[in-house]
Amino acid sequence: MAGGADDKAEHKYDMIDSGDAQLVAQGHKVYMKECASCHGKSLKGQANWQQRQPDGLLLAPPHDETGHTWHHPDGHLFRLVKDGVGALISPNYVSSMTPYKDRLSDRDIAASIAYIKSRWPKKIRERQGKITQSAIANQSQ
């Protein structure tokens, strides 16, 4: 049912607050445990992340301001972590990053994104906020 409880639940994490200190602290713990081994403790990603490996896969991209994470709206980032890259690009897309829907709660996923966003410079956070607001506005049209 459009506009019902399921629709609201689906879009609950379309706007993730990186100014929520408690959420960011939770996200720091989640990120260090679940993400840092590939994306780096300082969010720098893996070297040569833009070059496909012999197996066709890409390495983990940076999540700091040098990467492309901030080019995407919050809801997109949330769904990418929860359901995997293939869920957003193509069911046949293969990624070395597996979906986290069976490993992390929705709140933990949102918290990890809040932590990542909190590390960006203010100007990048503002730009990404506009991208997120635009995506939300487009959903309601």
Image: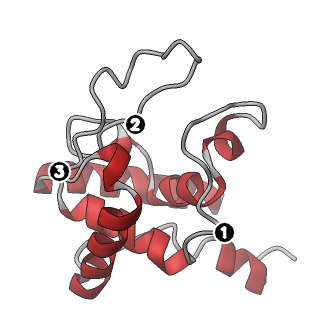
Residue 102's spot in the image, x, y percent?
Answer: 66, 69
Residue lying furthest right: 1
Q: Please report whichever mark, 3 or 2, sits nearer to the chain's N-terminal start.
A: 3
Q: Nearer the viewer, residue 136 or 103?
A: 103
Residue that carries the numbered disc 2 in the rendered image? 60
What element does badge 1 sit on? loop
Q: Which image quadrant for residue 31?
A: bottom left
Q: Which image quadrant for residue 92?
A: top right
Distance between mark 3 and mark 2 Cα atoms: 13 Å
| Discs 3, 2 touching: Cβ within 8 Å | no
Q: Nearer the viewer, residue 19 or 48?
A: 48
Residue 139's spot in the image, x, y percent?
Answer: 63, 58
Label 1: how many Cα within 10 Å (few below 14, some 14–19, many 20+):
few
For this view, does 15 lie left or right of residue 43?
right
Q: Residue at the location (66% across, 56% down)?
A: 83
Q: Which image quadrant for residue 101?
A: bottom right
Q: Nearer the viewer, residue 68 or 45?
A: 45
For this view, does 3 lie left or right of residue 121?
right
Amino acid at circle 1: Asp
Residue that carries the numbered disc 1 in the rendered image? 102
Q: Residue at the location (52% across, 72% down)?
A: 13
Residue 58's spot in the image, x, y percent?
Answer: 48, 26
Residue that carries the numbered disc 3 in the rendered image? 42
